Image (spheres, rainbow, N blue to C red):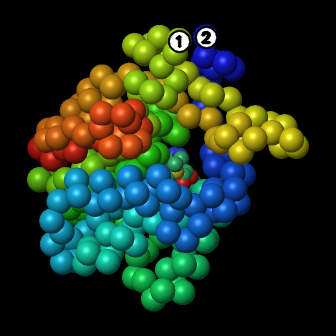
């Protein structure tokens, strides 16, 4: 078994909120090295050419780093995150830079936002692995999206994150939250996350009503020496 990994049920939503100050410090203003150099530019490319005003939903938006980049491309962005503290900071940043991105505290798996069926682009960067029942977030994405809308979802790569025990395990493996805050490393404080095989994300995206249009693997450094950090699936809502 992976060190400390265990099967669990629902993860309290407050775990990311507790981690928020560390995340904010780690991400700084423009995102940490990985976000700035790898995740955000790749997500932007995979989102494809924007249309001005294209209605975009950023699920698990955190501090809004990707939301602001999408807005800078002319998109009309709504960002949601379950952490009130991260959303407060995202709103503060939006106000400071006169951004029109609208940020809401919401569970991506149970959205009560206006405008369902109207979004033209749904993005979710590195957040599905942090959610129990991530398939519900994909189903909610389909509900919020209009027919033909594009979805771009990235997760920590299932082959390199928590694969040690059994890569194909269907059950969720959760790296438990370290409850002891004193004297533990930042990585051990990281909120619990779920390892699931690639097939889970592929099949749940299809089952949610998206036709998969592309798969990308983001490397830690240029190939061939890097290792895959993230898996990205893009899809189009067809049903
Ligand atoms: C690794 S961070 C990524 C943040 C952001 N997407 C970015 O790229 O900077 C994961 C985010 O998912 C959010 N999250 C976790 N579970 C969630 C849920 N059920 N609904 C909405 N957001 C959630 C966390 O609060 C956190 O901000």
Residue 69 picture location, percent across and down:
36, 70
- Per the image, label 1 sits on a secondary structure element best described as loop
The part of the image, by quadrant, that contains residue 136 is: top left
Quadrant location of the N terminus in the rendered image: top right
Q: Mark 2–mark 1 contact, CB under 8 Å? A: yes
Above or below, 31 against 204 in this view is below
- Pointer 1: residues within 10 angstroms few (<14), some, or many (20+)? few
From the viewer's side, name the closer residue of 32 and 99: 32
From the viewer's side, name the closer residue of 91 and 147: 91
Question: Is any atom of residue 97 visible in this view?
Answer: yes
Residue 61 as seen in the image, left or right of residue 210: right
Tell me which label, 2 or 1, sits earlier in the chain: 2
Residue 5 picture location, percent across and down:
63, 20
Q: For mark 2, what is the residue?
A: 1
Q: For mark 1, what is the residue?
A: 165
Above or below, 168 against 46 in this view is above
Residue 55 as seen in the image, left or right of residue 200: left
What whole-number distance in Å separates the C-alpha atoms at marks 2 and 1?
5 Å
- Pointer 2: residues within 10 angstroms few (<14), some, or many (20+)? few
Residue 173 as seen in the image, left or right of residue 4: left
From the viewer's side, name the closer residue of 104 and 64: 64
Residue 88 picture location, percent across and down:
61, 71
Q: Give the total number of marks visible in the rendering.
A: 2
The residue under the point 46% across, 46% down is 127
The residue under the point 69% across, 56% down is 22
- Per the image, label 2 sits on a secondary structure element best described as loop
- Outermost residue to the front: 225
Above or below, 219 against 199 in this view is below
Quadrant location of the C terminus in the rendered image: top left
């Amino acid at each position: 078994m992976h060190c400390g990994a265990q099967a669990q049920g629902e993860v309290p939503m407050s775990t990311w909120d507790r981690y928020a100050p560390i995340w904010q410090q780690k991400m700084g203003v423009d995102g940490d090295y990985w976000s700035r150099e790898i995740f955000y530019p790749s997500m932007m490319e995979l989102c494809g050419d924007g249309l001005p005003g294209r209605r975009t939903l950023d699920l698990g938006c955190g501090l809004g780093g990707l939301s602001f980049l999408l807005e800078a491309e002319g998109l009309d962005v709504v960002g949601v995150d379950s952490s009130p503290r991260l959303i407060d900071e995202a709103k503060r940043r939006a106000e400071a830079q006169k951004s029109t991105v609208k940020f809401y505290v919401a569970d991506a798996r149970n959205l009560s936002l206006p405008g369902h069926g109207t979004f033209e682009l749904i993005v979710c960067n590195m957040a599905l692995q942090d959610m129990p029942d991530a398939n519900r977030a994909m189903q909610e994405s389909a509900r919020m999206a209009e027919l033909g809308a594009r979805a771009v979802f990235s997760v920590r790569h299932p082959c390199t994150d928590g694969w040690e025990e059994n890569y194909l395990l269907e059950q969720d493996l959760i790296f438990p939250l370290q409850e002891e805050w004193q004297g533990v490393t930042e990585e051990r404080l990281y909120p619990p996350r779920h390892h699931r095989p690639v097939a889970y994300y592929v099949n749940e995206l299809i089952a949610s009503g998206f036709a998969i249009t592309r798969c990308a693997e983001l490397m830690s450094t240029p190939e061939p020496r890097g290792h895959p950090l993230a898996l990205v699936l893009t899809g189009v809502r067809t049903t």
